[in-house]
């Protein structure tokens, strides 16, 4: 009898103890003390071009989803991909061409794109003089400070040139020797180039300094292109679907904010991310991107966009074999209520069968 009482008492204690954490966890889920997960995001550049991301940060949307986000700037898609592969970053934000290159080279744990942020190019063609009647043909015979070979800025620039009947190799000189972020300084320090291709805030700063004038938007000239997207290693996606879902939820809130607020309101929110830039300049840049329909309404990386990207890569001579959309793009996370059935999916083995490796 004593043994039965002891067993009953022990069972009651065990049940009580095991029930406590579950109750506490549920209470935290409903309140403000939900467990926070640390996530490192490596971005290709720190630019107003990516305003929805900074809105999500400044408005606390990542915290609302239980994420403690650390933002690191990689200064180039190649560096972001390296950080992603090495495990220094959990999520990479860069041009999706980087994931295609990695797959092409035989990545055993390829980067999979799960959200697209921008749908137009974010750079501008800057000339030394005002050119209200600028035509792309004006570039013939001139020198232009361009971007890194194989990178989206340079490939989209060349894509536009070809659309306008200009041969990038024969009809002009494109200097690709200058590091990302240094072209504006090179443009002001050396007058051998008639034009430079610049992101913001460099384009607007050159204008304010009287050193250059924006004569064309590459975003408008190229049309809709999948310029930047978020990616993770396949292994990370399989192991952490809930983190990616929360990240996507937070980012979508930032997208919604941008779609429903004015450039002035957006500029005010993201200003803390750009302390060295005055609010008038930030507003000017946001309006420039806003007016050219830079940001998508949703984060879905559409198949047509992926195929267009591969067309651009092929046209630039950077792609040997096309990759199936399903191999490198996952769209489940944009639908908030759906879970992501990834484990065991054969589509995530596609790059492993290629020669080479990373």
Image (spheres, grey):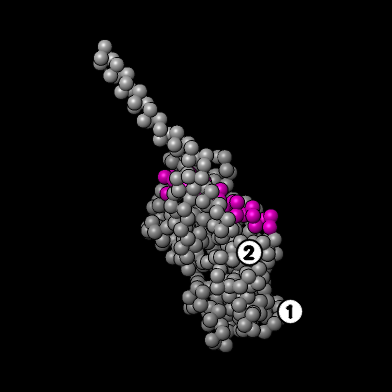
The span shown in magenta is 236-261
Q: Nearer the viewer, residue 31 or 337?
A: 31
For image coordinates 55% across by 79% down, the residue present is 184
What number is the disc on residue 300?
none
Q: Nearer the viewer, residue 50 or 341?
A: 50
Examine the structure image and report whether residue 141 is included in the region drawn in magenta. Answer: no
* Quadrant, the C terminus: bottom left
Residue tagged 1: 132
For image coordinates 55% across by 54% down, the residue present is 60
Asked which secondary structure carries label 2, the reply is: helix
Where residue 205 appears, as percent x and y from the top left, is 60, 77
**Would residue 149 be found to the left or right of residue 120 on screen?**
left
| Mark before the other along the chain sequence, 1 or 2 | 1
Quarter of the image for residue 127 reads: bottom right
Examine the structure image and report whether residue 252 is included in the region drawn in magenta. Answer: yes
Q: CA distance from mark 1 to mark 2?
A: 31 Å
What number is the disc on residue 268?
2
Residue 132 position (above or below residue 115):
below
Label 1 crowd bin: few (<14), some (14–19), many (20+), radius 10 Å: few
Residue 309 position (above or below residue 336):
below
**Would residue 322 be found to the left or right of residue 18 on screen?**
right
For image coordinates 44% across by 36% down, the residue present is 24
């Amino acid at each position: 009898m004593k043994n039965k009482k002891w067993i009953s008492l022990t069972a009651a204690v065990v049940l009580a103890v095991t029930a406590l954490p579950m109750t506490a966890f549920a209470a935290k889920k409903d309140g403000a003390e939900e467990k926070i997960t640390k996530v490192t995001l490596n971005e290709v550049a720190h630019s107003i071009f990516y305003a929805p991301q900074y809105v999500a940060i400044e408005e606390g949307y990542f915290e609302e989803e239980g994420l403690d986000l650390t933002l690191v700037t990689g200064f180039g898609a190649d560096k972001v991909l390296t950080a992603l592969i090495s495990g220094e970053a959990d999520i990479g934000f860069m041009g999706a061409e980087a994931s295609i290159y990695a797959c092409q080279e035989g990545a055993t744990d390829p980067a999979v794109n799960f959200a697209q942020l921008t749908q137009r190019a974010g750079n501008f063609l800057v000339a030394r003089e005002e050119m209200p009647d600028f035509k792309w043909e004006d570039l013939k015979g001139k020198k232009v400070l361009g971007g890194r070979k194989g990178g989206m800025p340079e490939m989209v620039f060349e894509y536009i040139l070809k659309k306008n009947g200009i041969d990038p190799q024969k009809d002009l000189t494109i200097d690709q020797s200058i590091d990302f972020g240094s072209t504006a300084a090179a443009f002001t320090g050396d007058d051998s180039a008639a034009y430079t291709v610049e992101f913001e805030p460099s384009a607007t700063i050159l204008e304010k300094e009287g050193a250059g004038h924006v004569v064309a938007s590459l975003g408008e000239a190229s049309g809709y292109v999948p310029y930047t997207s978020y990616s993770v290693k396949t292994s990370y996606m399989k192991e952490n679907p809930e983190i990616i879902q929360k990240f996507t939820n937070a980012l979508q809130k930032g997208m919604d904010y941008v779609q429903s607020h004015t450039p002035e309101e957006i500029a005010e929110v993201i200003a803390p991310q750009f302390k060295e830039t005055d609010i008038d300049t930030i507003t000017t840049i946001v309006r420039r991107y806003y007016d050219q329909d830079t940001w998508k309404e949703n984060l879905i990386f559409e198949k047509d966009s992926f195929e267009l990207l591969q067309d651009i890569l092929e046209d630039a001579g950077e792609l040997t074999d096309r990759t199936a959309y399903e191999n490198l793009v996952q769209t489940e996370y944009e639908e908030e209520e759906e879970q992501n059935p990834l484990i065991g999916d054969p589509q995530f083995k596609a790059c492993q069968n290629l020669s080479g490796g990373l």
